[in-house]
Image (spheres, coloured by chain):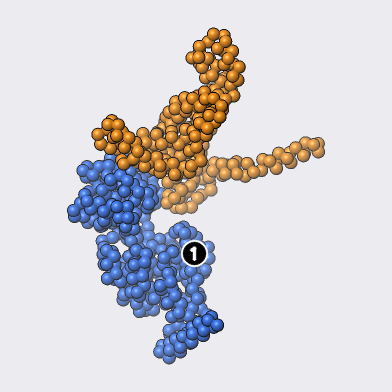
Chain colours: A blue, B orange
């Protein structure tokens, strides 16, 4: 009985919406039997905006979550994109997908909400190929400098503080080749931290090798960093992400984060349109829906990710430094970076 | 003829599982180590480039030698501690002895990672070791000397692998007939002489087996150095590990794993040789 009522109500609502849409603008979707297929990360297709999208369009949505960037790429490549309409990955992966011809450009005219993008996300170079847009910035975060506020009354201004003898054996650094070398390149002022020259590599090596004696340890995981920080009286840490701060506060450390003047590494996940998209219009409708400020609000408040549309919510959450980040790009040679990182650790 | 065939069939049936689970993976590793990777693609052409690359690069070869040295240290310290413990347990009477043995090997029932975390918190700045030394007045303030250096790696590995050393030594001691000891004493040998000329030689095979366990297990351990070694805890296991992620150089990683495998194999052969030469 109840089921029938709900069904009828939904049916009525759907028909009314359809009728209204048909009258108002023929181009607006009428999609009772349409399906959107999304390949994404957990947290990017949440009920707050997924349900609204379903009821607005009447379309069904199939969401597939990937466990890793490699898995996501394999799923897309396996079908040459034909299995999905939409995919989401970060700025560093564009060349890989573009080279494999798995994406198609997004027509900005179909995204009336594009104007909602905050200025620092409206012109991200990494998502453009020439004049054409391939990605729509959606969620972001950074690898900031985390410090103990009891040791610093004002936030450290420069990463150079991590070479200060005063804090020897009270500092932690990530054991991640790419993140370490990218930040090292930012600190030594390389022209492009993702296209390092041999000279840049030498400078980064010297810089990071010289730091070893001041570090207590490298750490290899999100929780590991938090535990080491809390147990060993750490003052400064090259962080793996914003959520480490609340985790430290929970353990009684008065931790805070800052983005020093040399910038910090940032990741920016985007929505991309699959080359094999069956229902392009519906996919663009999803992108447009994701540019709604309410979606940004839910993304930040529920998942602690930075959003790209709702500046006020970002501000309240302290995510005010999107313009001070260096968005990850594909590096010149990952193997070389791993080899260099090994040399630094063995040196 | 049919008897022969039946035997072969039984052998194949029995050998199938170990061949599938042990020989095949090792063989595939050996093969992989002869390929090369270029731009994230593994190229299946036979080359020894990975091996020359390894021995020609001090970052890798030096780290490898350092790791072998560390594992020999772990082995030595573990035997120096493990032997007296095993001997002491062996000396106990009746069921008492097995209770003690159970306690000594108890850590084997714990997850390796749990042990690592426990040790790390014990050796840390606010850990048990520092607290004890402060309480005894040996230290004036907590010291960071016990954690995040090579010494910490050594201590942690010894603690973790000690049960593997105690157990075979105890079993070797247990197999010595009591009558031999009594005969030795009857013939006028003191307890030191009995130990030196009877107990020690007869327990040597077990001791060598225990030492081997410690060496081989330490050689393959790439988590302990990462967890407690700080910036100096860099071992060949970490280098191998790094080749399988972002670098995507599986052939080079396989080559280094093969070198490690051969090193362990040489250790095992040397041990086997010294046991077989053993005369009483």
Secondary element at tag 1:
helix
- Residue A205 against residue B173 in the figure, above or below: below
If the image is split into quadrants, where does the N terminus of chain B sit?
Answer: top right
Front residue of B88/A10: it is B88
The quarter of the image holding the C terminus of chain B is top right
Query: Dividing the picture into quarters, in which one does residue A157 lie?
Result: bottom left
Question: How far across and how far down the image is residue A206, in percent?
Answer: 28, 43
Residue bearing mark 1? A76
Give the camera-side residue of B60 and A36.
Answer: A36
Residue A297 appears anywhere in the view: yes
Q: Is residue A130 visible?
A: no
Residue at the (34%, 77%) spot, across then down:
A113
**Residue A230 vs residue A75: left or right?**
left
Q: Is A341 on the left or on the right of B111, as rendered?
A: left
- Residue B255 rendering spot, x and y as whole percentages: 49, 41
Residue A94 location in percent, x, y?
40, 63
Residue at the spot x=31%, y=76% of the render? A115
What chain is tagged by disc 1? Answer: A
Residue plotted at (48% across, 38% down): B107
Is A336 drawn above or below residue B102 in the view shown? below
Q: Residue B211 vs residue A254: left or right?
A: right
Which residue is outermost to the top? B188
- Residue occupying the point 59% across, 41% down: B22
Name the image quarter holding residue A44.
bottom left
Residue A260 locus on image (x, y percent): 23, 55
B232 or A130: nearer the viewer:
B232
Q: Residue furthest right?
A: B2
Q: In the image, A169: left or right of B188? A: left
Dot 1, how many residues are within 10 Å of its Cα: few (below 14), some (14-19), or many (20+)? Answer: many
Q: Residue furthest left?
A: A153
**Looking at this rendering, what residue extends furthest in the bottom direction?**
A23
């Amino acid at each position: 009985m109840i089921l029938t009522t709900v069904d009828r109500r939904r049916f009525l609502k759907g028909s009314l919406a359809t009728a209204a849409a048909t009258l108002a603008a023929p181009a607006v979707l009428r999609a009772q039997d349409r399906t959107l297929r999304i390949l994404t990360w957990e947290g990017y297709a949440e009920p707050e905006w997924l349900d609204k999208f379903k009821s607005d369009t009447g379309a069904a949505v199939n969401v597939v979550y990937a466990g890793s960037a490699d898995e996501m790429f394999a799923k897309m490549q396996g079908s040459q994109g034909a299995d999905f309409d939409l995919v989401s990955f970060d700025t560093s992966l564009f060349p890989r997908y573009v080279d494999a011809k798995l994406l198609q450009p997004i027509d900005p005219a179909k995204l009336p909400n594009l104007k909602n993008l905050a200025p620092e996300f409206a012109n991200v170079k990494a998502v453009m190929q020439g004049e054409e847009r391939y990605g729509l910035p959606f969620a972001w975060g950074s690898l900031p400098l985390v410090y103990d506020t009891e040791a610093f009354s004002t936030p450290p201004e420069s990463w150079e503080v991590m070479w200060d003898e005063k804090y020897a054996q009270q500092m932690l650094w990530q054991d991640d080749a790419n993140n370490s070398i990218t930040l090292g390149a930012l600190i030594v002022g390389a022209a492009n931290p993702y296209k390092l020259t041999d000279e840049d590599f030498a400078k980064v090596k010297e810089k990071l090798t010289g730091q070893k004696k001041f570090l207590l340890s490298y750490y290899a995981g999100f929780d590991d960093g938090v535990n080491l920080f809390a147990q060993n009286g750490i003052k400064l840490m090259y962080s793996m992400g914003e959520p480490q701060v609340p985790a430290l506060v929970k353990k009684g450390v008065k931790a805070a984060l800052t983005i020093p003047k040399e910038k910090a590494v940032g990741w920016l996940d985007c929505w991309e349109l699959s080359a094999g998209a069956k229902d392009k219009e519906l996919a663009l409708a999803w992108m447009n829906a994701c540019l709604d400020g309410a979606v940004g609000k839910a993304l930040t408040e529920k998942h602690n990710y930075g959003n790209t549309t709702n500046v006020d919510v970002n501000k309240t959450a302290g995510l005010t430094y999107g313009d001070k980040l260096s968005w990850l790009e594909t590096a010149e040679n990952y193997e070389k970076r791993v080899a260099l990182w090994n040399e630094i650790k063995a040196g | 003829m049919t008897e022969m065939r039946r035997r072969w069939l039984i052998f194949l049936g029995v050998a199938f599982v170990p061949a599938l689970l042990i020989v095949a993976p090792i063989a595939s590793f050996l093969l992989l180590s002869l390929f090369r990777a270029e731009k994230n693609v593994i190229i299946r052409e036979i080359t020894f480039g990975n091996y020359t690359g390894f021995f020609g690069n001090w970052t890798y070869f030096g780290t490898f030698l350092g790791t072998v040295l560390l594992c020999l240290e772990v082995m030595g310290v573990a035997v120096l501690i493990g032997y007296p413990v095993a001997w002491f347990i062996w000396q106990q009477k009746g069921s008492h002895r097995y209770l003690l043995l159970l306690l000594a090997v108890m850590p084997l029932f714990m997850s390796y990672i749990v042990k690592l975390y426990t040790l790390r918190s014990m050796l840390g700045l606010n850990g048990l070791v520092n607290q004890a030394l402060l309480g005894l007045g040996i230290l004036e303030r907590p010291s960071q000397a016990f954690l995040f250096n090579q010494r910490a790696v050594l201590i942690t590995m010894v603690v973790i692998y000690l049960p593997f050393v105690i157990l075979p030594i105890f079993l070797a001691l247990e197999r010595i007939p009591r009558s031999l000891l009594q005969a030795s004493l009857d013939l006028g040998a003191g307890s030191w002489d009995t130990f030196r000329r009877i107990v020690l030689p007869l327990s040597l095979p077990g001791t060598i087996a225990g030492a081997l366990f410690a060496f081989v297990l330490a050689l393959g351990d790439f988590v302990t150095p990462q967890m407690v070694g700080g910036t100096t805890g860099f071992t060949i296991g970490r280098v191998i590990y790094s080749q399988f992620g972002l670098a995507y150089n599986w052939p080079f990683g396989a080559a280094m794993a093969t070198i490690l495998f051969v090193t362990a194999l040489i250790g095992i052969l040397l041990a086997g040789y010294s046991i077989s030469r053993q005369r009483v």
